[in-house]
Image (cartoon, rainbow, N blue to C red):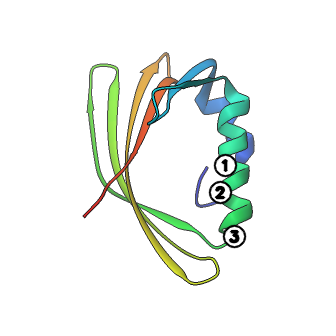
């Protein structure tokens, strides 16, 4: 979905009742939130590529550590940790945290 910019997969992978916990303590809900985030990232960094460095799953939780590279307007490198709760093959809840060195 991310590297291939397939926003259409949101309906296949994300529950319509998805809840995203933001770092400021607020909550965003629904697939539209995920679509909006994808659009913002793709519009801002047209050449961005993600690389999964580590992924661990236990029960209904998946933790993923990723690194991404992009140019806008200069080279950028991001590190993030994502935590997702999955039910019946759909992502129902998520958290994204920047990783600082």
Question: Residue 99, how many percent across, how many down?
Answer: 32, 55
Give the residue displayed 34% in from the left and 45% down from the top. Answer: 64
Mark 2 → mark 1, Cα distance in angstroms? 5 Å
Callouts 2 and 1 close, C-beta under 8 Å:
yes
Residue under circle 3?
46
Residue under circle 2?
41
Q: Nearer the viewer, residue 8 or 17?
A: 17
Give the residue displayed 59% in from the left and 54% down from the top. Answer: 2
Quarter the C terminus occupies:
bottom left
Secondary structure, mark 3, is: loop
Secondary structure, mark 1, is: helix
Can you tell which mark lies on residue 38?
1
Q: Earlier in the sequence, mark 2 or mark 3?
A: 2
Question: Residue 30, how many percent across, how many down?
Answer: 67, 23
Left or right: where 56 falls relative to 68: left
Secondary structure, mark 2, is: helix
């Amino acid at each position: 979905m991310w590297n291939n910019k397939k926003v259409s997969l949101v309906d296949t992978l994300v529950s319509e009742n998805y809840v995203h916990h933001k770092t400021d303590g607020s909550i965003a809900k629904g697939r539209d939130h995920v679509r909006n985030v994808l659009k913002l990232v793709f519009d801002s960094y047209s050449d961005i590529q993600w690389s999964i460095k580590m992924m661990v799953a236990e029960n209904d939780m998946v933790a993923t550590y990723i690194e991404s590279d992009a140019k806008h307007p200069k080279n950028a490198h991001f590190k993030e940790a994502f935590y997702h709760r999955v039910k019946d093959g759909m992502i129902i809840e998520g958290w994204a945290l920047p990783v600082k060195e």
